[in-house]
Image: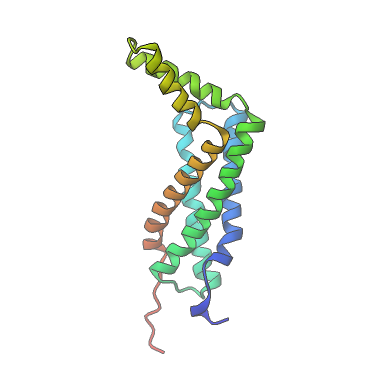
């Protein structure tokens, strides 16, 4: 296949699966070690995502394109890797919220109620109920998976835009 016709999606699928699995393993480690969701350790997932995207882009450049890659192709490889990883992480989020930790949504709801009452202790009961019903709707397993997908895709897109700047390598040799 001609180097110029090679797309980034195919090679990025397996790499996206690897990044998604790494994110799942990190999440499971946090769950098993009972790390608080508000802990700074949660930010390590961004490092895992960034390293996975960097690895994917470099692999795409070196193995699939012969060592040279434009900014656009580097970004595409990172974007598709992030897309697949985000999809896998969303599936895991749904499974996590329904099977692994079914009380997860209820914990979020209790935290939200505590936060609302801490910031506005005089809130009328009807407004509190309305706020909590909105929170409950947004913390259903399906909505957590959707928002997780959107958040991970947004993060991986931004990271891919940045990483592609450093990973590109133009072929300036005259043929």
User: In the current view of this chain or complex, which residue is farthest to the right?
Assistant: 99
x and y percentages locating residue 34 in the rendered image:
58, 25
* Residue at x-position 42% and y-position 57%: 160
Q: Is residue 57 above or below residue 7?
A: above
Which of the two residues, 136 or 168, is positioned nearer the viewer here? 136
Residue visible at 49% across and 51% down? 51
User: What percent of the width, then of the height, locates residue 125?
Assistant: 40, 12
Q: Position of residue 5 (x, y in %)?
A: 51, 78
Name the colouring of the figure: rainbow
Q: Residue at x 46, y 64 (%)?
A: 76
**Nearer to us in this view, 100 or 40:** 100
Above or below — where is 108 with respect to 10?
above
Quarter that holds the N terminus: bottom right
Q: Locate residue 77 relative to residue 172 in the image: left or right.
A: right
Q: Quadrant of the C terminus?
A: bottom left
Give the vertical position of 25 relative to 165 (above or below): above
Q: x and y percent of residue 46 in the render?
A: 46, 44
Q: Identify the residue at the far front of this view.
A: 126
Looking at the image, how many numbered discs can be counted on the residues? Answer: 0
Which residue: 51% across, 75% down? Answer: 66
């Amino acid at each position: 296949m001609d180097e110029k016709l090679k797309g980034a999606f195919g090679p990025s699928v397996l790499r996206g699966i690897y990044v998604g699995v790494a994110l799942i393993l990190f999440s499971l480690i946090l769950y098993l070690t009972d790390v608080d969701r508000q802990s700074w350790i949660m930010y390590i997932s961004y490092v895992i995502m960034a390293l996975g995207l960097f690895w994917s882009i470099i692999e795409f450049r070196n193995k699939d394109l012969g060592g040279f890659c434009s900014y656009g192709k580097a970004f595409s490889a990172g974007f598709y890797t992030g897309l697949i990883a985000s999809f896998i992480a969303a599936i895991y989020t749904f499974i996590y919220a329904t099977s692994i930790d079914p009380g997860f949504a209820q914990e979020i709801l209790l935290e939200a109620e505590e936060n609302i009452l801490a910031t506005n202790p005089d809130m009328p009961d009807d407004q509190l109920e309305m706020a909590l019903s909105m929170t409950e709707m947004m913390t259903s397993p399906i909505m957590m998976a959707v928002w997780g997908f959107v958040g991970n895709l947004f993060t991986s897109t931004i990271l891919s835009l940045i990483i592609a700047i450093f990973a590109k390598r133009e072929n300036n040799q005259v043929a």
